């Protein structure tokens, strides 16, 4: 049974990206398409999209469509990009007034309007295309009003008569909350009672909460995180709503796009390698150390970090641990990232304090991210919470041993190595505190000092398979169950 799936995502590779959501949206669309489904991607037509490269084609009959959101009037158009390789259709919602900004996300006062308009425009585009998706798959807070809109404003649209909805929570830390005074922007009329009343009374509206309340099925991006977000510790204030829907919540680990992230064919690398040819990894490392201005010999273990520098990622654990560790042990560090000032400042100062041993590249750089994955010996992710995390899975394939905290997808994709049995793929620590991270890094360095043991960990990791082909099948099962009416018929109504 082939399914028609509308994937709504605020970012999607290769068009736009700030983090893992883009990788997942792009790869899932391609994988579903490859499996014979009619998966189509809807994403904002940001000013940052390389229009020369993707040559979006304005669609006839979908130009200059008026859209009123509350008291705000916009005009949007839809253009189509065929993603290379697979031929997946991606629809860009073009509205320069909303998406013609310097970055994908902003702190501008109309942020909620940008994505409410995007969600509505995507649904309107389906109707104008005469396309009836079986599944409308929303992602994160940006499109989380989709399920409620389909039950209200779009309830009588023939195109959605049989549509069911899925919301995937990639990051519960971002909920898109805005003030209750903007309630008119939802255009719910007398159906305003469907909004979460306690939140309204408290003076705010939480988009992600409404996705949780109204989607037919909920997913998050790893089994462990699915359990975590129902707890007070990880639910970020949404645990009660999630517990209500626990039966409809599934954790599906993200996949890896091995056409992009594989040392055997990585398009950014000058040499390629696999578990049987690790000599090339060592040569790449030597070249990289020289290029980036490291002064230590290639035998020095290199630790890599590629990350958004956000509180979620747990870098404050490093504030005391790294300066001490660098004093005590032979180690080099390559850090690529951008984000909060305090983390940028920490890594800038660390690089000044340990010249030739720590290099911090502030910014976003795809090519450099691949080089760090390929040439590092260990990859550090001490996350406070991590719904899935992709870099640890990329690291495994590149023979770069992940050092991670046991949370979310990190717990589900990295197994702590056991020298006694030779099983395991990385170093996993439990507690979110500095001693635990210090222990993990010392352990990694101790193991690195035993080349045979280290090669075993590398090889174990390189043999892992997190391909999308396997993971996407779990989404298809949920879509099918929804279509066949096996999952909860309708989520609980609010009173
Ligand atoms: P998150 O979505 O929380 O940022 P993930 O691990 O799921 O975390 O995905 C992050 C993705 O973004 C990876 O593909 C990673 O390589 C990429 N990335 C993050 N920061 C940078 C950066 N500064 N430069 C290049 N790529 C980056
Ligand atoms: C998020 C999470 C990350 C996950 C990604 C894609 O932003 O922080 O853990 O891998 O989304 O699902």
Image (cartoon, rainbow, N blue to C red):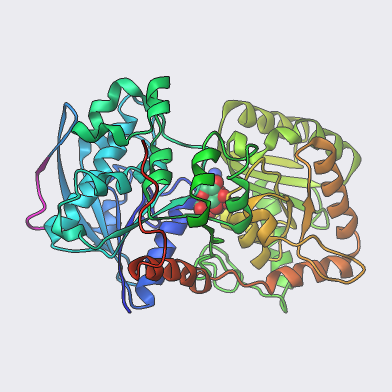
Q: Quick one: which residue is furthest to the front in this view?
A: 495
Q: Residue at x 86, y 34 (%)?
A: 324
Q: Which residues are magenta?
A: 57-66
Task: Examine the residues drawn in magenta and state their main secondary structure.
Answer: loop
Query: Considering only vertical position in the picture, is 5 above or below 194?
Result: below
**Residue 389 visible in the current orientation:** yes
Query: Considering only vertical position in the picture, is 472 above or below 389?
Result: below
Q: Nearer the viewer, residue 174 or 275?
A: 174
**Residue 472 pos. (x, y %):** 47, 69
Q: Residue at x 79, y 56 (%)?
A: 427
Q: Quick one: which residue is furthest to the left in this view?
A: 61
Write down the quadrant of residue 266 in the picture.
Answer: bottom right
Q: Residue at x 63, y 47 (%)?
A: 228
**Residue 368 visible in the current orientation:** no
Write down the quadrant of residue 52 in the picture.
Answer: bottom left
Query: Considering only vertical position in the picture, is 379 above or below 356?
Result: below
Residue 58 colored in magenta in the image: yes
How many numbered marks, from 0 up? Answer: 0
């Amino acid at each position: 049974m082939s399914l028609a799936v509308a994937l709504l995502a605020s970012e999607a590779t290769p068009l736009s990206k700030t983090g893992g959501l883009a990788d997942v949206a792009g790869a899932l669309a391609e994988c579903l398409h490859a499996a014979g489904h009619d998966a189509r991607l809807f994403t904002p037509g940001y000013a940052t999209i390389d229009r020369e490269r993707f040559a979006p084609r304005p669609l006839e009959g979908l130009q200059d469509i008026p859209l009123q959101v509350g008291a705000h009037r916009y005009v949007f158009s839809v253009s189509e990009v065929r993603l290379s390789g697979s031929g997946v259709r991606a629809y860009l919602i073009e509205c320069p007034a909303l998406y013609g900004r310097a970055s994908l996300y902003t702190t501008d006062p109309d942020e909620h309007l940008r994505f409410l308009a995007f969600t509505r425009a995507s649904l309107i585009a389906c109707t104008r295309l005469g396309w009836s998706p079986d599944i409308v798959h929303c992602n994160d807070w940006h499109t989380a009003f989709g399920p409620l809109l389909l039950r209200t404003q779009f309830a009588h649209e023939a195109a959605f008569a049989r549509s069911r909805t899925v919301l995937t929570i990639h990051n519960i830390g971002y909920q898109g909350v805005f003030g209750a005074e903007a309630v008119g922007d939802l255009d719910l009329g007398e159906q305003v009672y469907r909004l979460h009343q306690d939140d309204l009374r408290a003076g705010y509206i939480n988009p992600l909460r409404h996705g949780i309340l109204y989607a037919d099925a909920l997913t998050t991006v790893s089994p462990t995180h699915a359990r975590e977000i129902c707890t007070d510790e990880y639910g970020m204030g949404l645990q009660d709503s999630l517990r209500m829907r626990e039966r409809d919540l599934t954790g599906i680990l993200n996949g890896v796009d091995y056409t992009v992230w594989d040392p055997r064919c990585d398009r950014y690398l000058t040499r390629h390698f696999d578990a049987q040819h690790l000599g090339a990894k060592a040569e790449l490392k030597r070249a990289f150390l020289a290029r980036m201005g490291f002064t230590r010999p290639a035998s020095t273990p290199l630790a890599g970090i590629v990350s958004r520098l956000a509180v979620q990622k747990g870098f404050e654990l490093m504030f005391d641990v790294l300066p001490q560790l660098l004093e005590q042990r032979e180690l080099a560090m390559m850090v690529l990232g951008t984000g909060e000032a305090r983390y940028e400042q920490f890594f800038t100062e660390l690089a000044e304090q340990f010249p030739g041993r720590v290099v911090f590249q502030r910014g976003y750089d795809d090519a450099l991210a691949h080089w760090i994955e390929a040439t590092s010996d260990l990859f550090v992710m001490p996350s406070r919470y991590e719904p899935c995390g992709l870099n640890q899975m990329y690291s495994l394939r590149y023979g770069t041993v992940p050092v991670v905290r046991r949370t979310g997808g990190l717990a589900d994709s990295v197994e702590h190595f056991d020298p006694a049995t030779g099983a395991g793929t990385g170093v996993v620590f439990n507690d979110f505190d500095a001693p635990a991270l210090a222990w993990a890094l010392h352990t990694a360095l101790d193991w690195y000092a035993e080349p045979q043991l280290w090669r075993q960990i590398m090889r174990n990791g390189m043999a892992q398979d997190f391909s999308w082909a396997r993971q996407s099948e779990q989404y298809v099962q949920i879509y099918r169950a929804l279509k066949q009416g096996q999952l909860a018929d309708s989520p609980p109504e609010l009173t």
